[in-house]
Image (spheres, rainbow, N blue to C red):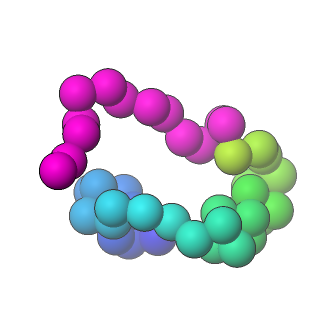
């Protein structure tokens, strides 16, 4: 969690996301935001 807050993580595994959602009693859409213009490659 300490790496997620400052944005140092490029991705999250689905099982990790599920555990966070269970703990916070929320849905993935409550946590995730799409920001356009952040394309890599």
* Residue reaching furthest to the top: 36
| Residue depicted at 70% across the width and 73% down the height | 15
Q: Residue at x 17, y 50 (%)?
A: 41
Numbered range of the magenta stretch: 29-41
Residue 36 location in percent, x, y?
A: 32, 26
Report the residue at 67% width, 37% height from top. 29
| Outermost residue toward the front in this view | 41
Give the camera-side residue of 21 and 34: 34
Residue 12 placement (x, y as % from top left): 51, 66
Q: Left or right: where does residue 5 sit relative to residue 22? A: left
Query: Which image quadrant is residue 24 in?
Result: bottom right
x%, y% of residue 40? 20, 48
Residue toward you, 5 or 13: 13
Instruction: Give yes or no for residue 38 being in the magenta stretch.
Output: yes
Residue pictured at 77% horizontal, 44% vertical: 27
Report the side of 14 relative to 2 (left or right): right
Q: Is residue 40 magenta?
A: yes
Q: Is residue 14 left or right of residue 4?
A: right
Chief secondary structure of the magenta portion:
loop
């Amino acid at each position: 969690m300490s790496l997620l807050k400052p944005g140092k993580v490029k991705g999250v595994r689905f099982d990790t996301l599920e555990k966070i959602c269970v703990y916070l009693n929320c849905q993935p859409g409550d946590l995730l935001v799409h920001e356009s213009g952040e394309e890599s490659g």
